[in-house]
Image (cartoon, rainbow, N blue to C red):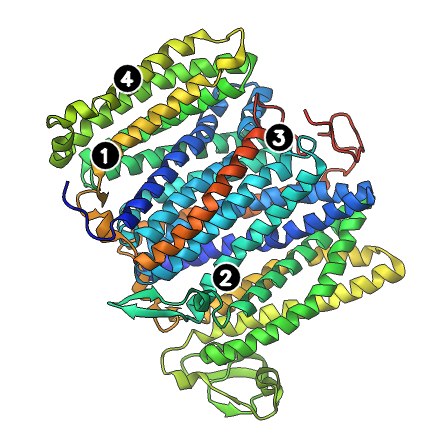
């Protein structure tokens, strides 16, 4: 590693904060997008209502992590923000359309006339898939350093599909955790299908990243770093195996371990994210712009940091409080 | 096609669509708190009935505001990268504070407000309502601070072409912020007042005379009657402030081309940019001067004073007249309405007039924002950054594609929103079909 420029702690702190926000987003909005992706896997309207009810109290706050993540990119690395978002113009526009459709369908399906409900369910699922797919597209495009051409496009499409499946996986695991009876059983089946596609996805991205960049190849495959890094892929593999075994064993007599698949999937998300972060460090635009080159003025970053340090614990506290209130198996959501 | 023009149209469409929803939620949060507090104090179920109906409207509106707001935060980057690159050191922290202090708060406690009644103690539910209302207002505060700073920047210096913050208090409390904030909050209050009065009247006309509906109708009318004179006062003060800091905007609003002492008030005209004159002008002598400078022979600068650095006159001129016109209508309707309610109660005529005014707040707010935003052109940040300089390198066809997509989506969503509001209003207040057991109960259900 090269020596760090003076004052490097600020950009590093913000890169970490941004990465954590993005990771929290992927896990949290991942599960509610996943529930949306799976929504029309059943024709049973009561079951669909229960699926939506399970994410009802959470999706709004979950989505806020995306706003924070992009917000931090915007404020901490303004130079990178413009480059990244203009390069990703089309998937960003599609993602926004997906998020809009998904977010409003959630409200409309509960409030519009009953006859329109199936139509809003289609919108809900379509929006969730579109948002997830576009995020995967962005990830794929980012990994290849915004390379152009059919090969890069094809890869981005592939990561799009894998992201849909990864969200479906964590969404299904959420339903295993928060669902009961037939819904839980169905969710376990969905989870297993999504598991194998996601597995293939992790392998494909892990293979493509070092091939696309000699620098990343160097970073992962030079001794002794390879040995030090080995726990990441090994642990990921172990978690996939655990999920493969565990998901066959539903329904269980006792609900006390229902959270395990969700936690295991979240852990896989963390490990993959960790791998990507390690690959790209210290770049914010791959191979072009480092976090130090793209950072805002220190005095502005300090102002945000003060606010963030004061407020983030409070956010953590009341998020915990909300999760307590709406904990346990999903109940019917009534507006009173 | 000019990509900058397309990017502008797209952003204008986005911001116009977005503003419709916070305009409602900012004040509706406080109105809900009012309804809830009245219920807590009196135990009168009518207050809770009104709360139950309007919290649904809040949820629906909030969802639309969130998703269109997320869109805007991305469009800073996709369409206007130059904005953050040049003024990011000021805009960034303000936006970050909005997310940190407002977004998480409102998004988290909204769940308790919507679904928590019965799961949490009543007091926590009231507290959640307070926190959501506070969150939406906090969000409005930060955004208006940023917007005002873009109009009247202070507390910064430019180093190597990039803005650096030097005095955060001066940035936050920039000269136009208090006026803009007051004007917007009051606009939100008025929008909600007429929405409540209008939608409740519609329910009343359809035969739902339940106390909750009547209560909401009266709340709307009284709120409107109280707020409109305050708004006119605030608007006047805002105008004086604008005259001081952005005289070219005032000149465009008033349709004054040549600098003059004691200008009249142009009631109507068709401003012609080519000849730089007004056609078909109807004018009241001295009144313009009286309103703008509070004296009969004050000097008001004309548009010609600013060379080519002035906003397009016609849209600002007309938008201003629409805003003021709707405001006057609001004054007449709400005062007449309050008087009628007092003398004779709800009458079919009153109800019909109020139905007609349901979305008047939207019209006035949009017109007002057009005055203020078109009025600052050609600057994006006054004296620092021109709008054209902030645009990104995206191809025109790409923007055209996304523009068409957004426009179609927004039109469909707006239609769905209004139809759903009407559908909600069509449902009878009581007995509620979705309420299982505990019918008409005013006590919270035992925690499950």
Q: Position of residue A186 (x, y in %)?
A: 49, 14
Looking at the rendered structure, the secondary structure element under dot 2 is helix
Q: Earlier in the sequence, mark 4 or mark 3?
A: 3
Q: Are marks 1 and 2 on the same chain?
A: no
Q: Which residue is mark 3?
A: A115
| Chain letter of the residue beneath label 1 in the structure image | A
> Relative to B274, is B105 on the left or the right?
right
Under circle 3, the secondary element is helix
Q: Label for residue A237?
A: 4
Q: Mark 1 vs mark 3: same chain?
A: yes
Q: Residue at x 63, y 25 (%)?
A: A332
Q: Does residue B279 lie above or below B331 as drawn?
A: below
Marks 3 and 2, Cα distance to the nearest angstrom?
41 Å
Which residue was labeled with disc 1? A278
Judge the density around disc 4: few (<14), some (14-19), many (≥20) Cα neighbours within 10 Å.
some
Q: Find disc 2 in the rendering and name its residue.
A: B144
Label 4: chain? Answer: A
Residue at mark 4 to residue at mark 3: CA–CA distance? 46 Å
């Amino acid at each position: 590693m090269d020596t760090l420029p003076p004052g490097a702690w600020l950009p590093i702190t913000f890169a970490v904060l941004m990465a954590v926000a993005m990771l929290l987003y992927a896990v949290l909005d991942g599960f509610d997008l996943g529930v949306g992706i799976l929504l029309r896997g059943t024709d049973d309207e009561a079951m669909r209502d229960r699926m939506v009810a399970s994410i009802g109290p959470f999706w709004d706050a979950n989505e806020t992590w995306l706003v924070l993540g992009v917000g931090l990119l915007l404020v901490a690395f303004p130079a990178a923000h413009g480059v990244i978002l203009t390069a990703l113009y089309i998937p960003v526009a599609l993602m926004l359309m997906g998020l809009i459709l998904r977010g409003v369908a959630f409200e409309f399906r509960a409030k519009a006339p009953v006859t329109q409900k199936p139509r809003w369910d289609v919108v809900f699922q379509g929006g969730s898939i579109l948002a997830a797919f576009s995020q995967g597209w962005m990830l794929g495009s980012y990994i290849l350093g915004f390379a152009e051409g059919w090969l890069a496009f094809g890869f981005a499409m592939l990561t799009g599909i894998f992201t849909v499946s990864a969200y479906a996986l964590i969404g299904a695991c959420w339903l295993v955790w928060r669902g009961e009876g037939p819904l839980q059983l169905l969710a376990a089946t969905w989870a297993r299908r999504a598991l194998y596609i996601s597995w293939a996805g992790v392998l494909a991205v892990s293979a493509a990243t070092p091939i696309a960049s000699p620098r990343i190849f160097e970073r992962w495959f030079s001794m002794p770093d390879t040995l030090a890094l080995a726990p990441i892929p090994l642990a990921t593999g172990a978690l996939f195996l655990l999920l493969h075994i565990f998901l066959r064993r539903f329904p269980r007599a006792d609900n006390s371990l229902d959270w395990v698949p969700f936690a295991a999937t979240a852990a896989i998300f963390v490990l993959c994210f960790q791998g990507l972060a390690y690959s790209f460090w210290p770049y914010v635009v791959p191979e072009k712009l480092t976090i130090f080159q793209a950072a805002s003025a220190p005095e502005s970053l300090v102002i945000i940091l003060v606010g963030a340090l004061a407020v983030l614990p409070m956010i953590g506290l009341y998020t915990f409080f909300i999760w307590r209130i709406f904990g346990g198996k999903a109940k019917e959501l009534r507006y009173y | 096609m000019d990509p900058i023009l397309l990017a502008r149209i797209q952003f204008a469409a986005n911001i116009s669509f977005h503003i419709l929803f916070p305009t409602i939620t900012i004040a509706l949060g406080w109105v809900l708190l009012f309804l809830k507090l009245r219920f807590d104090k009196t135990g009168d179920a009518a207050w809770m009935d009104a709360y139950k109906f309007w919290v649904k409207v809040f949820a629906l509106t909030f969802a639309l505001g969130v998703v269109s707001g997320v869109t805007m935060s991305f469009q800073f980057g996709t369409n206007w990268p130059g904005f953050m690159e040049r003024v990011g050191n000021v805009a960034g922290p303000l936006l970050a504070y909005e997310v940190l202090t407002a977004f998480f708060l409102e998004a988290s406690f909204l769940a308790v407000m919507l679904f928590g009644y019965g799961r949490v103690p009543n007091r926590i539910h009231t507290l959640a309502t307070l926190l959501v209302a506070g969150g939406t207002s906090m969000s409005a505060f930060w955004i208006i601070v940023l917007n005002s700073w873009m109009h009247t920047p202070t507390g910064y210096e430019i180093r190597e072409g990039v803005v650096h913050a030097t005095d955060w208090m001066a940035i936050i409390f920039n000269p136009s912020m208090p006026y803009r904030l007051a004007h917007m909050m009051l606009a939100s209050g008025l929008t909600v007042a007429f929405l409540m009065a209008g939608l409740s009247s519609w329910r009343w006309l359809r035969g739902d005379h339940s106390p909750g509906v009547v209560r909401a109708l009266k709340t709307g009318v009284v709120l409107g009657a109280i707020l409109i004179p305050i708004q006119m006062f605030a608007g006047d003060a805002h105008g004086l402030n604008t005259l001081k800091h952005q005289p070219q905007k005032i000149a465009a609003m008033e349709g004054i081309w040549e600098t003059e002492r004691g200008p009249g008030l142009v009631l109507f005209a068709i401003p012609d940019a080519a000849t730089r004159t007004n056609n078909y002008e109807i004018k009241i002598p001295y009144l313009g001067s009286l309103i703008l400078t509070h004296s009969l022979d004050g000097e008001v600068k004309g548009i010609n004073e600013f060379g080519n650095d002035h906003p397009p006159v016609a849209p600002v001129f007309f938008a201003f007249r629409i805003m003021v016109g709707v405001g006057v209508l609001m004054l007449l309707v709400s005062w007449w309405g309050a008087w009628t309610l007092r003398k004779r109660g709800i009458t079919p005529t009153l109800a019909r007039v109020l139905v007609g005014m349901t979305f008047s707040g939207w019209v006035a707010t949009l017109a007002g924002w057009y005055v203020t935003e078109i009025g600052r052109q050609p600057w994006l940040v006054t004296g620092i950054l021109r709008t054209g300089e902030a645009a990104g390198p995206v191809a025109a066809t790409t923007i055209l594609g996304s523009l068409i997509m957004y426009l179609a989506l927004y039109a469909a969503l707006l239609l769905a929103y209004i139809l759903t509001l009407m559908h909600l209003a069509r449902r009878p207040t009581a007995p509620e079909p979705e309420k299982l057991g505990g019918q008409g109960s005013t006590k919270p259900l035992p925690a499950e």
